[in-house]
Amino acid sequence: QKNFHLLSPHQIELAKTLLELGQTHLFEHWAEPGVADDEKKAFFDQVARLNSSYPDGLESYIKTARELLADSKAGRNPFDGFTPSVPTGDVLTFGDDNFIKFEETGIREAQKAAFVLVAGGLGERLGYNGIKVALPRETTTGTCFLQHYIESILALQEASHSLAQGEVQKKIPFVIMTSDDTHSHTIHLLESNSYFGMEPTQVKLLKQEKVACLDDNEARLAVDPHNKYRIQTKPHGHGDVHSLLYSSGLLNVWRDAGLRWVLFFQDTNGLLFNAIPAAIGVSATRQYHVNSLAVPRKAKEAIGGITRLTHVDGRTMVINVEYNQLDPLLRATGHPDGDVNGETGFSPFPGNINQLILELGPYIEELTKTKGGIKEFVNPKYKDASKTSFKSSTRLECMMQDYPKTLPPIARVGFTVMDTWLAYAPVKNNPDDAAKVPKGNPYHSATSGEMAIYRANSLILRKAGVQVADPVQEVFNGQEVEVWPRVTWKPKWALTYSDIKRKINGNCSISQRSTMVIKGRNVFVEDLSLDGALVIDAIEDAEVKVGGSVQNKGWILEKVDYKDTSIPEELRIRGFRVEKVEELEKNYTEPGKFSLKPLRVKSTHQVT
Ligand code: UGB
């Protein structure tokens, strides 16, 4: 109290609350009044921040922490009373009539969408020094994840507008959730690249705050080991995105602008936008309040399973159950074998890839009740079986996919399963850990993430009738992967399977050692035989037909050792780099109609 004169009335209230909540230890080692006043003021500024950034404030944080810590100590099962069963949802097959129909609906609806990228995580498992969205999605073009996401959203906007005759054209809003770890780097990446072509006003950054650490089962807040005038803090998890969106006021702005969908996605899934148009189509057709994207899941694979939980009191919900909880839950509820593959060779529970589509109206209604607060959990590492003290401080955490936990039973919660090759290839693991992944399980590394792009694009072209050669097996950074032809295109060239079908015609073939990069929107590939590297760019008003026979020495994948620090980190972590030996590169910068039809002659280094 001797320091109260330093504080605003609001801060005095907060100080009293802390004392009432048994937090006197925070002040025990403070210097006498008049000493270190700036640090003391800074302490209360921090307390005010911790209070305002948590729904219902610090008092509620401490109370929830006590409850959850007591449950954890008592070993209470969060699924007590619940029986799991397999929920119903849409299982899509790429390229069939149903898929095409959902994509058409999705494109039409896309202009009523807003996109939210959660990018506050540091990616500790990957061990990369920069922010993950700055990593190249693939190194053939070097396009980073953020650029690809923005270009995909812009391409969706464009495609949606072209279908919406007479309607007011809307720009698709794009929100990025950052944290202190990623905020300034994300701004720098956007600003130094002119927002990758998006209007700066379309992009909003919301920074999540960390939460207070807890020292014991009484939820005594932890003093920062480096500064006795600060509370130690740690990340609260991606679930923060809901309270940040709620408090930003953006949701109401979007509703007033006629938007209907909010799409949430994670930082490094380079295949995601292959799935987005059809998934929005499913949401719109089924009128889902919540639609989770999923992929077939091998039993015990380290991704959560989407599960219907029915409580003895009749409540039901469709929710992600993390993989380490699914097996014990099944065993405890009459499935003695636990989490096992069914006849299809996969677990009957689809794998959560944490890409959610929420319908805006019901979302606002729900957040008005919860203020965006998400059911939290705590994961203390106890010193011993008495569970009375922790090895290190802990904190409450929350996950964005737990949003449906508070929804009323009438909420329409569904999911959409797509093939893994089409929709999911995250970059999460460092080369050492990836190399230790049991054979047959996904590496989720920079190596596998890049190879998955080429594989998906090659399979998409195959489906459209192109003869794409089989892949070869190669080992990079200790991981055996399939190497397909390095095919990439800009999202504005093709977003949907129908776009691909329209732009690829005749008899086309691509050899395994080939690279094909298509950048221009109006590039049409017809009767092309490619054995080497081909790069085509064109301005909007240039329509280019590409065919004939292209043969050159091409671009080669040269192995690099990830421990070789003379090589840039973003290349090292994938174990190869692209050696550009010879290519046919054309850039059409004048309006008009053009045809590129090289004869079967061996090209020299051609660049125009
Ligand atoms: N993130 C934040 O923005 N803030 C945070 O405080 C933390 C993370 P991880 P995780 O795709 O296989 C998720 O660390 O949490 C962002 C699902 O919970 O990559 O271990 C971060 O920047 C899990 O069910 O993943 O696991 C990143 O964009 C499963 O679906 C995102 O949150 C798993 O992803 C995810 O963070 C998966």
Image: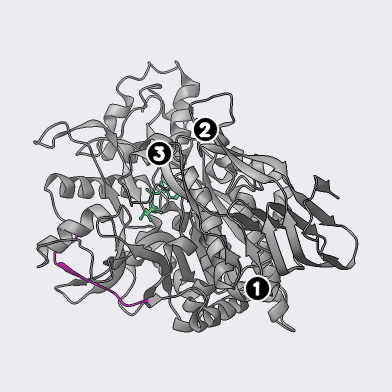
- Position of 45 with respect to 70 (left or right) is right
Magenta segment, which residues? 79-89
Mark 1 / mark 3, whichever is N-terminal: 3
Q: Is residue 68 depicted above or below 317 in this figure? A: above
**In front: 497, or 195?**
497
Question: Disc number at residue 129?
Answer: 2
Q: Residues within 10 Å of mark 2 (few under 14, many from 20)?
A: few
Report the residue marked by disc 1: 499
Disc 3 residue type (three-letter) = Arg
Residue at point 41%, 67% (across, down): 292
* Number of the label disc, if any, that sits on residue 381: none
Q: Are marks 1 and 2 in contact (CB under 8 Å)?
A: no
Front residue of this view, candidates 149 and 541: 541
Q: Does 398 sit left or right of 282 as displayed?
A: left
Residue 374: where, in percent of width, then height? 36, 57
Beta carbon of the mark 3 residue lies under 8 A of ligand 1: yes
Q: Looking at numbered disc 1 in the image, what kind of residue is underneath it?
A: Asp
Please state which amino acid type lies under the numbered disc 2: Asn
Q: Magenta span has 85?
A: yes
> Which disc is residue 125 wearing?
3
